Amino acid sequence: QVPLMESGGDSVQAGGSLRLSCTVSGYVHTRDSRKCMAWFRQAPGKEREGVAVLYTVGEATALSKVSASVRGRFAISQDSAKSTVYLQMNNMISEDTAMYYCAFNEYCGTSNWYLPRTYNAWGQGTRVTVSS
């Protein structure tokens, strides 16, 4: 498995912003590297929800999506040189309160990026709390 480390979770007021980071340890980025990185979140008593995905092949972006529940507020990006993926969260609402997880797999697609079973490596999670 590929070690993943999330950071950036915190407590914020509704309407505020946070940026989460996920670093892939020991990952060597090459021209032909395939990397599907996704952010999931899980609130107490709820199922794990796919929030955003970024699938790259070398320097090209093959897939970049955010879920309908966060569209217009969240964005995913990467710094390939640092093997780090970011989740920028703006205009946050109380429903964004959850544990956020980073996930990795070499492949993903439009039909399965939001399914937890697609990924073979997960981070430990970082907690986000939004108070109104």
Image (tube, rainbow, N blue to C red):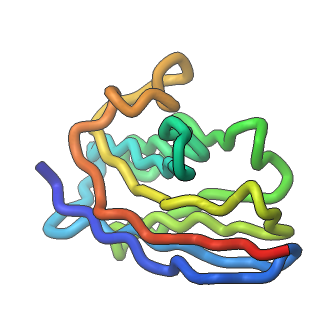
Residue 123 against residue 38 in the figure, above or below: below
Residue 98: x and y in percent read 57, 59
Residue 64: x and y in percent read 60, 42
Residue at 61% across, 57% down: 76
Q: Is residue 56 left or right of residue 105?
A: right
Q: Is residue 120 left or right of residue 52?
A: left
Q: Quadrant of residue 94?
A: bottom right
Residue at 45% across, 27% down: 115
Along the viewing direction, whichever of 102 and 23 lies nearer the viewer: 102
Q: Quadrant of the C terminus?
A: bottom right
Residue at 85% across, 52% down: 72
Residue 128: x and y in percent read 58, 71
Along the viewing direction, whichever of 28 and 72 lies nearer the viewer: 72
Counting labels gives: 0
Q: Quadrant of residue 83?
A: bottom left
Q: Residue furthest front?
A: 45
Residue at 53% across, 43% down: 45
Residue 12 against residue 111 in the figure, above or below: below
Residue 74: x and y in percent read 73, 58
Along the viewing direction, whichever of 3 and 33 lies nearer the viewer: 3
Q: Residue furthest top?
A: 111
